[in-house]
Amino acid sequence: MVTQILKLYKTVYIVEDIIHNKVLMNKLLSNGIIKVDSIDEIPDGSAVMFSAHGVSPQMVKQAEKKELTIIDSTCPVVKDLQNKVKEKSDNGYSIIIIGNRAHQEVVALLGYANNDNVYVVNNEMDIDLLPDLTGKKVAYFTQTSMYPDDIQPIIDSLKAKIPNIESNSIHNICEATLERQAVIKAIAPSIDLLLVVGSSYSSNTMSLVRAGIASGIGQVMRIDSEDELNLDLFKDTENIAITGATSTPEDIINEVIDYLKNNLEITVQEFPSSNPIEESINADEQGS
């Protein structure tokens, strides 16, 4: 998609990373994408690509004012969440967002809650700092890339403090993320090592790491790419599971699998899961 966009436009600017994946972002920046600190730095009439995590309505207005061509890469799940937050806010609700207040997705969501009564909570201690909202119209939403076991205690505490709080669902976590977490939990008893392919600043990636640890898998490793693999780590390992975040391109995961296939004697079993693929490998290191 990005390659096609670069063919259409001479120069494409970004303000935030399109997705939270170091390998892909390095590739994009080396192929003509230009990253700037703000919309103001982009020449009038140029093309700007918005992040998959979304941007605030205020940033959209800035881009329109400069007559920029907008390439909107916002994830459909995030876009749906933005619309729901805006709808509740427009109807006079106080909005509580469960998530990381510094994450691009949450920063953008704050822009859709177009009133002063919007709050971000990242843990149960943050709930103690909320004003008394009893009897008022209140709705909570969750960042789409959170780990369910992390947010459930926060949701329970919110409901205890604000019995009248509403939500359109238990959470707003991306289904693809939930599927991968569920597969990890299901196969955990038979896995010696979980290999998560993705960047450390990706919330999706780290939620999969936490799922592996919480499921009791003996070794959980995160890598950005095959370049970080060390075959010595697999010497005493029989069953390896490989998964990737929604922000990890499939070709990067396939490169990891191919590298292991070429260097280990393995059999591969693919588990039903949404793209990118999730595989379990029975491995023995080759003699040579």
Image (cartoon, rainbow, N blue to C red):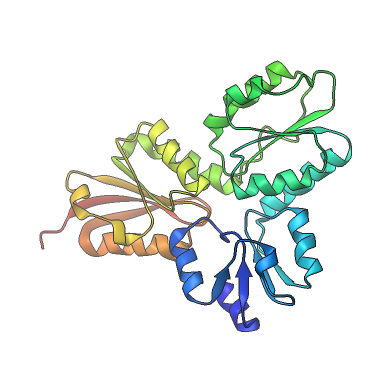
Q: Position of residue 17 (x, y in %)?
A: 56, 60
Above or below: residue 141 compared with residue 201: above
- Where residue 225 sits, quadrant-wise, is bottom left
Outermost front residue? 41
On screen, residue 114 versus residue 121, left or right, reads right
x 82%, y 43%: residue: 114
The C terminus, quarter of image? bottom left
Q: Position of residue 88 (x, y in %)?
A: 83, 38
The front one of 242 and 51 is 51
On screen, residue 75 versus residue 94, left or right, reads left
Above or below: residue 240 compared with residue 93: below
Outermost right residue? 91
x 61%, y 79%: residue: 11
On screen, residue 236 versus residue 222, left or right, reads left
- Where residue 251 sits, quadrant-wise, is bottom left
The front one of 173 and 158 is 158
The front one of 82 and 218 is 82
x 67%, y 32%: residue: 170
Outermost left residue? 287
The N terminus, quarter of image? bottom right
Q: Position of residue 150 (x, y in %)?
A: 53, 31
The front one of 250 and 66 is 66
Q: How many marks?
A: 0
On screen, residue 228 versus residue 89, left or right, reads left
